[in-house]
Image (tube, rainbow, N blue to C red):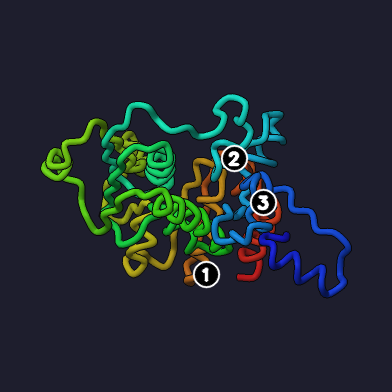
Amino acid sequence: RIINPRQAEDILAAGHIDMAGMTRASIADPNFIKKTVEQREADIIYCVGCAQACMGRVNRNQHVTCFQNPFTGREHVWGELTNTTNRKKIVVVGGGPAGMSFAWVAASRGHEVNLYDDHHELGGQVLLAEQLPLCLELGTVARNLSRQVYQAGVEVYLNTSATSETVIAQNPDEVVLATGSKPYLPQNVQGINQNHVFTFERAFTQPDLLGDSVLLIDNDGHQRGASTAAWLIKIGKKVQVVTEFSHIGSNFEMSLLRVRIYQLFFKT
């Protein structure tokens, strides 16, 4: 997979190919070529190869879009960003993908936007996901959005919890809560709140508390469960997986990544 213009140029210069085609790269950023010609490579929204909203949607007979670029596939509906005629002061709480996306769009339209996040960098759970086996490229999502946020002129407050006092002091016209989701723990399961039951987030941040044998429950059949299993194996755990699907990772759009993760299983 050719990701960026320099990579394409190097392969062309070496004489390995006569032409480079980058379909998904152009889906993630339709201005890919224009930015390259204008020597604005730092502004390119680079594809991360997730295939969730492009190939994944096509496989389900849905139109192509991009989970990084919400305008892709919706150009005739949303059109180009236009300056607002009703400028507002907006506080955004949460610096994950949702909060960053809202912040840069609002700021690009001329609103005054202040974004708060209690972490030391923007990215939310993407920063956690990129540390899983074979998922490093997902961190590009956070870096792409973070760059757009700062370029749009958003005022960013890191290592800062947005308390009610903090928000009220800003006297905003609108407040957007983008604090993310909470792990699902089915309360009808006896013992679900005991200390030896871990969410992925807790397991990843406190791996020393895990036992040698781990039972992983995969209830979405997607990358999260498969990558978590691969990570547990990588740190030396004996892993058993329970899933309602035919196999772990059955809903993967990224077939190649799924194969590579399975290779981690079989090598262990």
Q: Position of residue 14 (x, y in %)?
A: 83, 75
Name the residue beneath numbered marker 3: 34
- Which picture quadrant has residue 222? top right
- Residue at the spot 43% in from the left edge and 41% down from the top edge: 108
Give the number of the mark in front: 2 or 1.
Answer: 1
Q: Residue furthest top?
A: 77
Name the residue beneath numbered marker 1: 234
Q: Is residue 183 left or right of residue 15?
A: left
Q: Are marks 3 and 2 in contact (CB under 8 Å)?
A: no
Label 3 element class:
helix
Q: Which amino acid type is shown beneath numbered disc 3? A: Lys
Q: Position of residue 58 (x, y in %)?
A: 71, 35
Give the number of the mark in front: 3 or 2.
Answer: 3
Judge whether 155 appears above or below 72 on screen: below
Judge whether 84 appears above or below 170 on screen: above
The Cα atoms of the two marked residues, 3 and 1, are separated by 42 Å
Q: Which amino acid type is shown beneath numbered disc 2? A: Phe
Q: Is residue 159 left or right of residue 36?
A: left
Q: Earlier in the sequence, mark 3 or mark 2?
A: 3
- Quadrant of the drawing holding the C terminus: bottom right
Name the residue beneath numbered marker 2: 245
The Cα atoms of the two marked residues, 2 and 1, are separated by 23 Å
